[in-house]
Each structure stands twice: as structure tokens, then as C-alpha cells.
Image (spheres, rainbow, N blue to C red):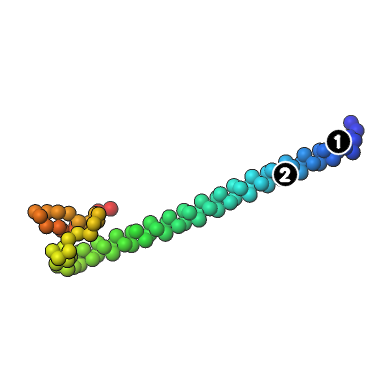
Amino acid sequence: MVVSDEEELQLIRKTQVGFGAVLAVLLVVGIVSYRSLAASAETERWVQHTHEVLEHLETLILESPTVWASSLRLKGPPAGHSLWSLVNGRFHGISSIER
């Protein structure tokens, strides 16, 4: 089968468009994957930071109960803070954080 020059150019053009489309899809997938990995790493850093803060708070509560008690009598609990409870009309810090 003999192919004319015009048909050969159309075939080359279609092949180039096909490869271009595949490269564009690969580029988009690569960008989305990179952004997803970057977001995952940022989330991991925040999770690690949260664990460090919780450990620090637990240490503070366990090592200095008198400071916490005097602070509670003077100021009351921080608004919306989950480490405090009201018992017999007085606010108390939770002595242990369960994981």
C-alpha cells in the first residue's frame, strides 16, 4: 500500500498530537502527586507538633499540681479548654492524658 505525502503528514501530525497528550497527562499527574506529597508532609509536621505539645502539657500537669491548683483558683479555666473539669464548684486539671 502506497501512502501519499499528505497522508503521511497527517499520520505524523496525529502521532505527535497523541504523544503530546500523553506527556500533558503525565505532567498533570506528576504535579498533583507532588502537591499531595507536600501537603502530606505538612500534615505530618503538624501532627508531630501536636503530640509534642500534648506531652509537654502532660508533663506540666503531672510535675506541678500545686501551681495548676493555685492558678485555677485565681483565674479559672481557659475558655473552651478540654484539659479542665468542674468538680464540686472548682475547676481541676486532668492529671493524665489518655491516648
Residue 91, position as x, y percentages in the image: 15, 58
Please say if 16 is above or below 85: above
Please say if 40 is above or below 18: below
Left or right: 94 in relation to 49: left
Point 20% across, 67% down: residue? 63
CA gap, disc 2 to disc 1? 18 Å
Please say if 54 is above or below 14: below
Q: Which of the labelled discs sits on residue 42, or is there none?
A: none
- The mark that comes first in sequence, 2 or 1, is 1
Quadrant hosting residue 53: bottom left
Point 86% across, 36% down: residue? 7
Left or right: 84 in relation to 13: left
What residue does disc 1 label?
7
Please say if 99 is above or below 5: below
Residue 61, position as x, y percentages in the image: 21, 63
Q: Residue furthest top?
A: 1
Query: In what element is the residue under mark 1?
Result: helix
| Residue 95 visible in the shown view | no
Q: Nearer the viewer, residue 33 or 72?
A: 72
Q: Are marks 2 and 1 in contact (CB under 8 Å)?
A: no
Label 2 Cα neighbours within 10 Å, binned few <14 / some 14-19 / many ≥20 = few
Query: In what element is the residue under mark 2?
Result: helix
| Residue 51 visible in the shown view | yes
Residue 32, position as x, y percentages in the image: 56, 49
Residue 87, position as x, y percentages in the image: 12, 54
Q: Amino acid at mark 2?
A: Phe
What residue does disc 2 label?
19
Label 1 Cα neighbours within 10 Å, binned few <14 / some 14-19 / many ≥20 = few
Point 76% across, 44% down: residue? 16
Q: Amino acid at mark 1?
A: Glu
